[in-house]
């Protein structure tokens, strides 16, 4: 795991929630976007073969650099989707999409 | 009432959209206010999520603009029950007088008699080697991370670019303890100083700008005017930036970069609506054409307000929201409260004066885009290099941006040219030796942002 990228500097007294990212449990704070939840704990969002490592770019829903998926293969924009208790996230393209 | 109620749709709940909604609501109309974000305010007055533990005050969040933010939010609370507010909704297409909206994974149509577009602006990006490394973010994004999530994009952030937002955001980072590694500005300090002199008639704005600058100096943040970004260095993360001035190169250690060369209007919906565009030589952007009050040229039922109709800033956005609502009600013969546009029109003049001074203060060097090396990635979605773009200009004869897009795939990716089309147009124009306007602009394409096929298919009429 790489060093956390984003640094919390305010509003840190929030309820903790649990999410799962690529099968690993991660804790996040209520109100975190998925992008913040993941990158306050590591340095990147996606590290998939065939594309540059991604950590998002515009953080306002415009650049589409921060796509991730839920376990059902639904695409999520990490910078505008909030983390919720029990969410199961994948940071690689779901196989399902290729299989079907 | 003899006539059926007028169906008015406002797109965007930033300062322009909110002021338009207020004025319409006060006149007894009930506009639909559609916004992509979960809470009102736009990007400038972006609010933290409504979750316990976000405790920063308006003063902490918005600094010198706190009163304006508070007033907007109070206004929204007051009119909330009189308008049809739909957050989390993306208008991704316009067909005649219907807006196609994605919300919660489904599409719906909103039929309107009149449309106010208040779609705002985003950062203007100029590419440099390494700009796609993890740790490089837009300047606006760096500020949103702070306002919306209480996060800094790194521990030692280098701020690179142009415009007052650069100094403001660097100052905001310093204030919360994330002291910037440096602020790098390609324009010269003498341009900045000369522009400052033009702002003596606007002491509030002038003193704010100088305060940000002096505060950075006081905290020993290097503010490097006249320096250009040569390269962002790193592999799995940003490690440093290389900057140069008059042949001198230096390296600055940092773990993140915030980059933004001013702001550009989000004009995709105006384009889909069929509004006529005109080239704004000052802003170096093709913009939807309107009259002084915001009536669109080419569409009788469309009005534009705020930074989506050309960058003028948040104060002007509020004024333009009211002006557009006023024009709309005048055109549709709706009697409304006595409103004299004079004060708001004067506010636009002031904002234009400020914008002119800011552009002069941060004017990019003439060869700024010519100096982008052939190996530099221009389009991050489609991985198109500057050299490849120059290649299609020369060899294949693309003299216009859409043609260059077909040949090189520049601007064809999932951001739909938001990040690269300005740089691509500048590079293409420079390579061809023509003016920026003559290479045209990328045509708008629906959906204006990617929407899952299932969402399009699940369309309720």
Image: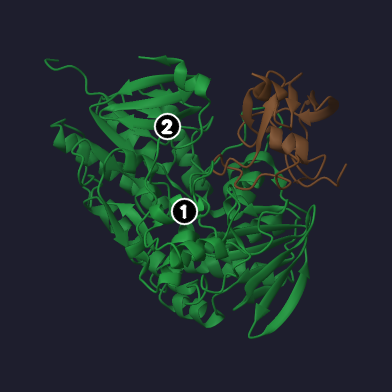
Chain colours: A brown, B green
Residue at 38 percent across and 31 percent down: it is B93
Q: Nearer the viewer, residue A2 or B23?
A: A2
Q: Nearer the viewer, residue B53 or B283?
A: B283
Q: Which mark is residue B92?
A: 2
Q: Is residue B79 visible?
A: no
Check if mark 1's residue and mark 2's residue have beta carbons within 8 Å: no
Q: Give the foreground label among 1 and 2.
A: 1
Q: Label 2 lies in what chain?
A: B
Q: Which residue is mark 1?
A: B407
Q: Residues within 10 Å of mark 2 (few under 14, many from 20)?
A: many
Q: Is residue A9 visible?
A: yes
| Dot 1 and dot 2 within a common chain | yes
Work out which quarter of the rendered image holds the C terminus of chain B and state it: top left
Q: Residues within 10 Å of mark 1 (few under 14, many from 20)?
A: some
Mark 1: secondary structure:
helix
Q: Label 1 lies in what chain?
A: B
Work out which quarter of the rendered image holds the N terminus of chain B and state it: top left
Q: Earlier in the sequence, mark 1 or mark 2?
A: 2
Residue found farthest to the right: A1
Query: x, y (%) of residue B366?
Result: 47, 77
Q: Nearer the viewer, residue B441 or B29?
A: B441
Query: x, y (%) of residue B428?
Result: 44, 65
Residue at 51 percent across and 23 percent down: it is B453
Q: Quadrant of residue B281?
A: bottom left
Mark 2: secondary structure:
strand
Query: x, y (%) of residue B392?
Result: 47, 61
Q: Is residue B104 left or right of residue B183?
A: left
Query: x, y (%) of residue B203?
Result: 45, 68
User: Is B459 placed above or below B354 here?
Assistant: above
């Amino acid at each position: 795991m790489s060093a956390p990228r984003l640094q919390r500097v305010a509003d840190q007294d929030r309820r903790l929630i649990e999410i799962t990212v690529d099968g690993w449990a991660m804790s996040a704070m209520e109100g975190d976007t998925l992008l913040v939840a993941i990158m306050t704990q590591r340095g990147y969002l996606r590290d998939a073969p065939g594309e540059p490592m991604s950590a998002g770019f515009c953080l306002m829903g415009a650049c589409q650099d921060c796509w991730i998926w839920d376990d059902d293969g639904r695409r999520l924009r990490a910078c505008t989707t909030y983390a919720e208790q029990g969410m199961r996230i994948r940071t690689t393209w779901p196989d399902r999409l290729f299989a079907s | 009432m003899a006539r059926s109620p007028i169906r008015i749709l406002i797109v965007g709940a930033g300062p322009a959209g909110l002021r338009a909604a207020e004025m319409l609501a006060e006149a007894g109309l009930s506009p639909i206010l559609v916004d992509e974000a979960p809470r009102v305010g736009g990007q400038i007055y972006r609010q933290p999520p409504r979750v316990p533990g976000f405790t920063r005050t308006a003063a902490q969040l918005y600094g010198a603009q706190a009163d304006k933010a508070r007033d907007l939010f109070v206004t929204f609370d007051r009119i909330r029950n009189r308008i049809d507010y739909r957050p989390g909704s993306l208008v991704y297409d316009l067909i005649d007088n219907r807006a196609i909206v994605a919300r919660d994974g489904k599409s719906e149509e909103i039929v309107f008699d009149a449309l106010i577009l208040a779609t705002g602006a985003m950062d203007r990006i100029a590419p440099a080697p390494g700009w796609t490394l993890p740790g490089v973010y837009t300047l606006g994004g760096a500020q949103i991370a702070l306002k919306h999530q209480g996060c800094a994009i790194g521990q030692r952030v280098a701020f690179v670019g142009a415009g007052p937002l650069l100094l403001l955001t660097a100052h905001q980072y310093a204030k919360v303890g994330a002291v910037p590694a440096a602020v790098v500005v390609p324009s010269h300090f003498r341009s900045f100083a000369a522009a400052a002199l033009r702002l003596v008639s606007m002491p509030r704005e002038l003193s704010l700008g100088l305060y940000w600058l002096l505060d950075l100096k006081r905290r020993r943040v290097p503010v490097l005017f006249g320096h250009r970004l040569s390269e962002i260095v790193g592999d799995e993360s940003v490690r440093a930036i290389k900057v140069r001035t008059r042949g001198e190169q230096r390296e600055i250690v940092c773990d993140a970069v915030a980059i933004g060369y001013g702001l550009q209007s989000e004009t995709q919906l105006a384009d889909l609506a069929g509004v006529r565009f005109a080239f704004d030589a000052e802003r170096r952007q093709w913009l939807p054409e309107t009259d002084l009050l915001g009536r669109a040229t080419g569409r009788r039922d469309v009005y534009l307000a705020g930074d989506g109709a050309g960058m003028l800033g948040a104060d002007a956005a509020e004024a333009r929201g009211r002006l557009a609502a006023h024009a709309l009600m005048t055109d549709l013969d709706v009697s409304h409260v006595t409103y004299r546009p004079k004060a708001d029109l004067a506010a636009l003049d002031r904002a234009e004066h400020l914008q002119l001074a800011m552009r002069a203060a941060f004017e990019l060097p003439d060869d700024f885009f010519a100096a982008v090396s052939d190996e530099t990635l221009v389009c991050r979605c489609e991985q198109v290099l500057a050299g490849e773009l120059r290649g299609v200009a020369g060899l294949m004869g693309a003299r216009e941006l859409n043609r260059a897009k077909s040949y090189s795939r520049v601007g064809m990716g999932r951001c739909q040219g938001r990040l690269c089309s300005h740089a691509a147009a500048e590079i293409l124009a420079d390579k061809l030796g023509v003016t920026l306007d003559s290479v045209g602009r990328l045509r708008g394409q629906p959906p204006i942002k990617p929407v899952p096929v299932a969402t399009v298919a699940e369309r309720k009429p």
